[in-house]
């Protein structure tokens, strides 16, 4: 999907008809548009979402006021005014034009809610346009609604991607984008197919098979219920985490208890680090015992073994004076080394055979020689084990002492906030305690449901094996059982495929995330994308990985890095599909349109992010203010800019100072006085 242009008609700040070209190429993929605060950058970003999906982002106030205020005021009561937005783009080798339009009738000064119509055209080979039926479904096919969050976003709110409540949604959207949803959809439908097939087993399979099938059906129903419960529990837990964080932020903002809350945050961080260190020390001890613990029980065995060997040496049994393999060769050849024939059951044959019973095996002597070389070092290894265990126990003790001490400090700080004389602080702390209790209950229930699901899966597998062995005389039931077994085999294969592909995609996404993040940040932080698609930051301290509490700026960088990684991986996957002949040349190509890309970043990060932005996607539309976009940002982006624009603000507030903006060596209007408030979207060509 590559954007060609956007056309706005009376859309919020943009009065009249305004158009902006967005075409770009791989050499200059960036469109850079400047606008003052409130000029309409967020409106322009939302215009794309409104055209494609008919929605505006949650941060847009007065969403029903779609028509430009000045145009609405000039419209007479009883008249109507058009509002629309149109985007032209190409995708999979086809050109499309999408228009969402509403004709708003004015009955009062207040704008009523509208139900806009969407239309879509595609350009045919002869250049003519053809109306697309079911345009909204076609749009969802090109770019699903959930996936759009990665390509049309507000940079100041992009850190929402790393919030606890976003992970389940992000995970699902990623699966859609990376072609995993089809496998999941098949897994959803297979149980329905299986249930229809197994109905014949319950009816005609005989008492035993019918009973087993009923048990399988009941277990599958229970599994489905538990999975739904698990989704609800995980969603509830995410919501509780979000609510708890909001409560903590309110405590941090309270001037009277902020120092206590700040101290508690510090202690909580230290406590988490101490617990991680304790877990690492316990794991180290467990590994030490698992791999070398046997040495503690070898002292007596080694001494007795060595004593037996010494006795054998004194007797001359070791090394063996005669090898059994040598005697076997003589008997097989039928001739002694002295030339005497060794015929079976003769006296010479009997004497040589008796030597065979006393001879030693070469393999036994070789093993003994190897073992004897290990006995002496084991004494040293046992001493080393004892020393290492002693050091490990000391570290564990130190970490436990630190955890206990920090828990006492945190408990004391909790008490100060709980017993505060300020009623609002008491209420917030009580709310935090309540949320922590509810979170613990949810976590315990999630663990119990997970355990039950694992057991049910095992029970279903066992019942399926029992069903396979049950006697079935009815031909229809036998066919149903065979087909059900086939469905189960397909399900297991698809589950394995999904697991492998999900693991592979997550690993590739994690590697790309690390690469992009590393190119932006100057701190020794490493991002990680967990199995549940949770974005975290950690740092390495003395070999121990410790979590890093993320600031707003770090959340923004982490989220931008994630978006860049998603965009690149989507293109790589579609490129692989193209090699297999399964997709068009531009499949997997999506633009990124971002407002306030630099948010609260400092100057060093602004420069690094600017440098990385040009490599994020094959097409990039960046909306920035003059304070954010000039200087290092413009210097880094200018070589990649194909289109440069300004949202020219017109205001009726005469107290507002008029401003110009200097771009490419020329001054251009930035803020101007006017009779009414509106904005003009202008392309800078000079």
Image (cartoon, rainbow, N blue to C red):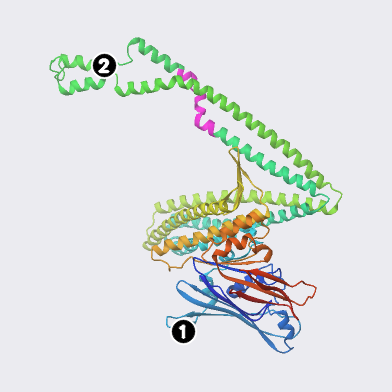
Q: Position of residue 360 (x, y in %)?
A: 29, 19
Q: Position of residue 274 (x, y in %)?
A: 66, 39
Q: Position of residue 421 (x, y in %)?
A: 87, 49
| Residue at the spot of label 1 | 128
On whether residue 334 falls in the magenta region, the answer is no
Q: Residues within 10 Å of mark 1 (few under 14, many from 20)?
A: few
Where, quadrant-wise, is the C terminus in this rendering?
bottom right
Q: Residues within 10 Å of mark 2 (few under 14, many from 20)?
A: some
Q: Earlier in the sequence, mark 1 or mark 2?
A: 1
> In which quarter of the view is residue 136 placed?
bottom right
Left/right of residue 654 with respect to residue 176 in the rendered view: right
Mostly what secondary structure, the magenta segment? helix
Is residue 138 shown above or below 459? below
Q: CA distance from mark 1 to mark 2?
A: 99 Å
| Residue at the spot of label 2 | 322
At x 73% / y 46%, what residue is drawn?
A: 265
Report the magenta residues as a range: 287-302
Q: Position of residue 10 (x, y in %)?
A: 66, 81
At x 64% / y 48%, what residue is drawn?
A: 444
Can you tell which of label 1 and label 2 is closer to the viewer? 1
Residue toward you, 309 or 540: 540
Label 2: which secondary element: loop
Residue toward you, 311 or 558: 558
At x 55% / y 64%, what residue is drawn?
A: 639
Res 274 visible: yes
> In which quarter of the view is residue 264 placed?
top right
């Amino acid at each position: 999907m590559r954007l060609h242009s956007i056309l706005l008609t009376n859309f919020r700040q943009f009065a009249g008809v305004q158009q902006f070209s967005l075409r770009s190429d791989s050499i200059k993929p960036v469109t850079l548009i400047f606008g003052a605060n409130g000029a309409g950058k967020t409106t322009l970003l939302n215009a794309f979402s409104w055209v494609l999906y008919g929605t505006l982002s949650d941060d847009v106030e007065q969403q029903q006021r779609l028509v430009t205020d000045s145009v609405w005021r000039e419209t007479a009561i009883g008249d109507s005014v058009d509002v629309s937005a149109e985007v032209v783009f190409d995708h999979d080798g086809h050109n499309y034009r999408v228009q969402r339009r509403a004709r708003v009738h004015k009955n009062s000064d207040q704008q009523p809610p509208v139900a806009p119509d969407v239309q879509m055209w595609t350009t045919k080979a002869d250049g003519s346009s053809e109306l697309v039926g079911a345009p909204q479904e076609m749009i969802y096919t090109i770019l699903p609604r959930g996936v759009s969050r990665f390509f049309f976003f507000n940079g100041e709110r992009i850190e929402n991607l790393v919030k606890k409540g976003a992970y389940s949604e992000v995970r699902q959207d990623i699966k859609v984008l990376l072609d995993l949803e089809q496998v999941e959809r098949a897994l959803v439908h297979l149980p329905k197919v299986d249930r229809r097939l197994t109905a014949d087993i319950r009816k005609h399979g005989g008492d035993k098979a019918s009973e087993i099938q009923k048990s399988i059906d009941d277990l599958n129903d229970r599994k489905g219920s538990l999975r739904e419960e698990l989704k609800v529990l995980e969603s509830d837990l995410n919501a509780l985490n979000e609510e708890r964080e909001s409560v903590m932020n309110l405590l941090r903002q309270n001037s009277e208890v902020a120092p206590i809350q700040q101290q508690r945050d510090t202690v909580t961080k230290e406590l988490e680090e101490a617990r991680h260190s304790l877990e690492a020390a316990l794991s180290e001890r467990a590994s030490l015992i698992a791999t070398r613990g046997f040495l503690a029980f070898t002292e007596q065995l080694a001494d007795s073994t060595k004593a037996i060997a010494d006795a054998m040496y004194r007797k001359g049994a070791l090394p063996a004076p005669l090898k059994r393999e040598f005697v076997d060769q003589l008997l097989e050849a039928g001739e002694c080394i002295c030339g005497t024939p060794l015929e079976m059951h003769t006296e010479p044959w009997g004497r040589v055979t008796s030597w065979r019973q006393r001879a030693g095996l070469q393999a036994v002597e070789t093993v003994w020689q190897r073992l004897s070389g290990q006995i002496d070092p084991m004494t040293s290894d046992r001493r080393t084990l004892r020393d290492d265990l002693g050091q490990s126990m000391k570290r564990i003790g130190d970490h436990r002492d630190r955890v206990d001490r920090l828990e006492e400090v945190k408990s004391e700080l909790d008490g100060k906030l709980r017993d505060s004389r300020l009623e609002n602080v008491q209420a917030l702390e009580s709310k935090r305690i309540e949320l922590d209790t509810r979170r613990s209950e949810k976590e315990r229930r999630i663990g119990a449901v997970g355990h039950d699901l694992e057991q049910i899966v095992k029970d279903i597998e066992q019942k399926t094996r029992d069903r396979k062995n049950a006697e079935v005389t009815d031909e229809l039931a036998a066919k149903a059982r065979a087909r059900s077994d086939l469905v189960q085999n397909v399900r297991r294969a698809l589950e394995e495929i999904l697991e492998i592909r999900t693991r592979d995609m997550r690993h590739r996404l994690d590697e790309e995330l690390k690469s992009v993040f590393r190119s932006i940040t100057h701190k020794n932080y490493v991002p990680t994308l967990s199995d549940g698609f949770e974005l975290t930051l950690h740092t390495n301290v003395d070999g121990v990985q410790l979590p890093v509490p993320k600031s707003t700026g770090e959340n923004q960088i982490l989220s931008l890095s994630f978006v860049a990684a998603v965009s690149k991986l989507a293109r790589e996957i579609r490129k692989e599909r193209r090699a297999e002949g399964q997709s068009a040349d531009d499949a997997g190509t999506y633009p990124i349109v971002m407002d306030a890309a630099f948010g609260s970043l400092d100057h060093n990060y602004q420069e690094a992010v600017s440098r990385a932005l040009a490599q994020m996607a094959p097409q990039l539309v960046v909306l920035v203010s003059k304070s954010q976009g000039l200087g290092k940002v413009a210097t880094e982006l200018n070589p990649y800019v194909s289109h440069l624009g300004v949202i020219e603000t017109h205001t009726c507030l005469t107290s507002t100072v008029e401003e110009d903006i200097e771009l490419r060596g020329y001054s251009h209007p930035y803020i101007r006085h006017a009779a009414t408030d509106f904005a003009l979207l202008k392309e800078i060509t000079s």
